[in-house]
Amino acid sequence: MDENTVFRSPQNPNQETQPNPSQNPTMSQTSQVRQPTAGQPLSPSPSSVAPMPPTPPLQEQGGTPLQSSFPLGTIIKVVIGLFVVLFFAFVVFGLILPRLQKNSSGKAEITYWGLWENSSTMQTAIADFKKRYPSITVNYVKQDIKQYREKLTTRIQNNTGPDVFLFHNTWLAVFSNTLLPIPDNIISKKEFNTSFYPVAQKDLTKNGAIYGIPTEIDTLSLYINAQLFQAAGAEVPDNWDDFIRVARSLTVIDENGKIKTAGAALGTFDNINHAPDIISLLLAQNGADIKNLSATGKSAADALTFYTTFSTGDQKVWDSTLDQSMLAFAKGNLAMYFGYSWDYFIIKAISPDLSFQIHSVPHLPGRDMTIASYWAAGVSSKSKYQKEALLFLAFLAKKETQEKLFAEASKTRLFGEPYSRVDLLEKLKDNTVVYPFVLQAKDATSSFFAGDTYDNGFNSQMNKYLGDAVRSINSNSSTSPETAVSTLSQGVSQVLKQYGQ
C-alpha cells in the first residue's frame, strides 16, 4: 500500500478505492457575566433660598417682639447635614468596611467539581495546595457523569455553580462564554504548548486564549483477546489490510450461520461501544473534514462504506444480533475491541481472568492517528474568587500534582488517570496497560462525534445524525453511502449552527 491508499471495501481486498484529493463561537447555553459597575454617587446640590422681605416682628403684650424658635435657614442646614452623615455612614459601613474586612482576612473558599476521583484521593493533593496557600479552602465535590453537563450549565446560569470544574475536550464550543481565559501569569502559551499534547492545544484554545488544563489524556486503542490470537497464531494488525484478514480468520460461525465468535466489532452502531469514536477514526484517517463533510464527501463516504462492510455480506465479522461489544469482549466472544483506558476496569470487573492486551489502532499508510477523548479543568467566569481558582488550576497542571494523584488513585485501582503532560510519558513506559493509550497521544486528534459524554446536547445530537447514517446504509440498500453522507452533513451543519459554530 502506498501513501495515497484510502479505505477499500473488505469485500474486495484486492481492489483499491480511488483516493479523494481532500479532514466553536457558540450559541451560548450559559449567561454572560455581568461585572459590577463602579459609579460616583451624586452629591446633593445645596438649596438656594431666596431672601425674604423684612416683616414686622410680632408683638407680645407690652410691645416686645416675638423671636422664631426654628428659623428656616437652620432647618435646611440640619436636613443637609443629616443627609451627609447618613450618606457617609452608608459608604463607610456598607461599601468600604466590608471590602477592607474581606481583603484583610484574605480568605477564600472555592468549589471544584470532578468526576472520577474519590474525595480521599483528591484530598491528598488539596492538602499540598493548602500548605502553599493557607488562606484558600478547596471543597471537592465528585459529580455523576450522567446529566453532568446539564447540571453544570444550569448551576452556572443560576450563580450557584462551581469555581473550578471539569469539561470534556469537545465542550469548549458549549462553555467558551462561561470559562475564564487563563492569563499568562498562570500558564503562558509557551509553557502550555510544551507541557501538553498538540490535541489539547487545538481543543482547549480559542482565538489565542487558553480555556482549560487537561487533567488526563486518553486515546482510542485496540484491545485483543490474547488467548484467541495465540490459539490462531495471529499477529496483532497494525494496518487495515491485516486487520481485515485477522478479523475474518478469527470469526467463528455456528451450524446455523450465526456468529459465535466475532473477529472485530465494527459495522453497526447501536451495539458497539464507542461507535462514534471508531467512525471518527476512519473519517480522520481517510482525510474527511468532519466540520465540512460536504467538501470531503467522497472521503467520508468511503470511510462509511469501509465501516459498514464489516457487518454485511457473506464475510461479515459482526452483526446487530450480538451483545454490546464491550460485553462480548469481556465474555471472550470478541477477538478485537476498540476502547479507552477506563474500559479496562469494566472488562476486568466482568471477567477478572480474561487475558487481553492493548495496542495502537491500525492505520492507513502515512496516517498514524487516533481519536482522543479526555477531560480538562477550567475556571468559571462567574467565580467570586477567580484569582484563587486560577491558582488552584495552575496547581492541577503541575507535574508533581499529576504524579501524586496518579499514585493515590493507584492505591485503590490498577492505575490512575493517564498523565496529560508530555514530560510524564516515560514514567509510564513500564506500565503495559496505560502506556499504549498515552503513547498514541502525540498523533491524536479529536472529534465531536464522541460517545459516553452523556451531555444530552452537542455530542448526543451529532451522534444521532451519525447513527442515522450508518443505519440507513445497513438497512436500506437503496441508500448509498454518498446519500447518507449528504444527509449527515446537513445534520452536522444544523448542530454547529445551533451552537454558533
Image: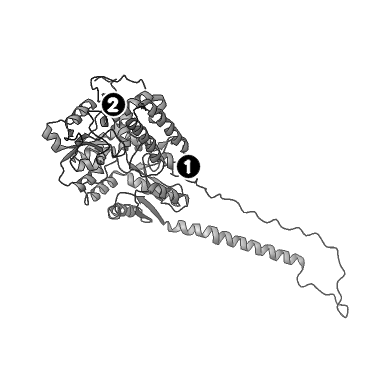
Residue 118 visible in image: yes
Q: Residue furthest bottom?
A: 62
Q: How many marks?
A: 2
Dots 1, 2 in contact, CB < 8 A: no
Q: Residue at x 50, y 47 (%)?
A: 33
Location of residue 37 in the rendering, given as x and y in whole percent from the top left corner: 56, 49
Residue at numbered disc 1 = 28
Foreground: 21 or 350?
Answer: 350
Residue at numbered disc 2 = 367
Foreground: 152 or 478?
Answer: 478
> Would you place residue 6 above or below residue 452 in this image?
above
Foreground: 35 or 441?
Answer: 441
SS at mark 1? loop
Q: Residue at x 19, y 29 (%)?
A: 248
Location of residue 135 in the rendering, given as x and y in whole percent from the top left corner: 38, 56
Neighbourhood count class around disc 1 (C-alpha, 10 Å): few under 14, some 14–19, many 20 upward: some
Location of residue 395 in the rendering, given as x and y in whole percent from the top left corner: 34, 47
| Quarter of the image where the C terminus is located | top left
> Would you place residue 292 above or below residue 151 in this image?
above
> Would you place residue 345 above or below residue 58 in this image?
above
Neighbourhood count class around disc 2 (C-alpha, 10 Å): few under 14, some 14–19, many 20 upward: some
Residue 371 visible in image: no
Q: How far apart in space, not on screen, are marks 1 and 2 (Cα)?
A: 35 Å
Amino acid, disc 1:
Ser
